């Protein structure tokens, strides 16, 4: 019995086109909502201090810009609708991240790394539940600590971490023939540690969130991406070219076949029959 089929090239192109269209539409909305907030919110005395150009309520209220745009356009009905959508979106995102984090810890780390694939399902479930509680507690603590931070800025920090830890590994493993597992692992960890560390000692966290005096931040820039991403790339490159193990030789020899398969699809495995 075959549970799924491999889509043909036309179907795949259509799916990619639709996905790209909706993702592009989502990012275009950022500009539309931003200019809408400038025009409709910051010029309305009901929502903002027009002279200062800030939303009423002090620090953190910039996160209400999109909701206030909805209220200015559609009144209380649209205001309530957008608020409900925002709440549902936050709930869905938090639930999804919690499940993915618990699954990664219980299956990838506990079962695969620590137990070498010999963990039973009951133990995995127990670890998953414990991880869910731990992630929830950490999220609450961080949410309280960063209560007054701008959400858009916090998202940019998450992108900076992804650009430092994930992007160098993905980019070089696909396009560079000498990339090895050791280089990818060490470089990814270097990008992750440097991006998180530099974020903590930046003015936006060290001073604004942790309450240290102005000018005391160890790292002078708001975002660490320019530096931490470079560290990630250099780490992958350095620890790959210095890897002379037998496993590294096999990985380098297998790169041409991987490149052909990734670019053309030739040699890719089909659907499994059950």
Image (cartoon, grey):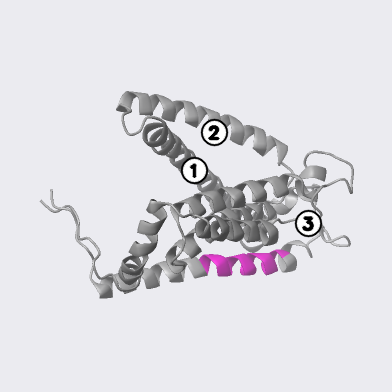
* Residue appearing at x 51%, y 28% in the figure: 133
Q: Which mark is residue 135?
A: 2
Label 1 to label 2, Cα distance in Å? 9 Å
Residue at x-position 45% and y-position 61%: 173
Q: Position of residue 111 (x, y in %)?
A: 37, 32
User: Mark 3 or mark 2, which is nearer to you?
Assistant: 3
Tag 3 secondary structure: loop
Answer whether labels 1 and 2 touch (C-beta < 8 Å): yes
- Residue 39 is marked as none
Q: Which residue is mark 1?
A: 97
Task: Give the CA separation, mark 3 to mark 2.
Answer: 29 Å
- The stretch of residues the image draws in magenta is 25-37
Taking 258 as reference, is 242 above or below it? above
Using the image as rendered, state which of residue 32 and residue 105 is in the foreground: 105
Above or below, 260 relative to 121: below
Q: Which residue is mark 3?
A: 221
For the point 69% across and 69% down, which residue is it?
Answer: 35
């Amino acid at each position: 019995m075959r549970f799924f089929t491999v889509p043909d090239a036309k179907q795949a192109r259509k799916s990619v086109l639709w996905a790209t269209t909706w993702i592009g539409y989502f990012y275009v909305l950022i500009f539309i909502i931003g200019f809408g907030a400038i025009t409709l919110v910051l010029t309305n005395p009901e929502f903002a201090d027009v002279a200062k150009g800030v939303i009423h309520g002090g620090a953190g209220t910039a996160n209400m810009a999109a909701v206030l745009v909805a209220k200015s356009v559609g009144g209380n009905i649209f205001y309530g609708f957008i608020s409900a959508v925002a709440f549902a979106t936050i709930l869905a995102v938090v639930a999804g991240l919690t499940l993915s984090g618990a699954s990664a810890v219980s299956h990838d780390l506990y079962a695969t790394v620590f137990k070498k694939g010999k963990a039973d399902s009951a133990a995995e479930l127990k670890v998953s539940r414990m991880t869910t509680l731990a992630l929830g507690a950490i999220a609450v603590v961080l949410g309280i600590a960063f209560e007054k931070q701008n959400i858009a800025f916090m998202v940019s920090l998450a992108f900076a971490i992804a650009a430092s830890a994930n992007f160098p590994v993905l980019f070089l493993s696909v396009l560079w023939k000498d990339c090895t597992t050791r280089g990818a692992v060490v470089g990814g960890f270097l990008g992750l540690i440097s991006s998180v560390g530099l974020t903590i000692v930046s003015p936006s966290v060290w001073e604004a969130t942790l309450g240290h005096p102005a000018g005391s931040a160890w790292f002078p820039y708001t975002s660490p991406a320019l530096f931490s991403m470079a560290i990630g790339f250099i780490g992958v490159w350095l620890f790959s070219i210095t890897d002379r193990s037998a496993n590294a030789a096999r990985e380098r020899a297998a790169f041409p076949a991987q490149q052909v398969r990734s670019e053309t699809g030739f040699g890719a495995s089909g659907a499994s029959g059950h």
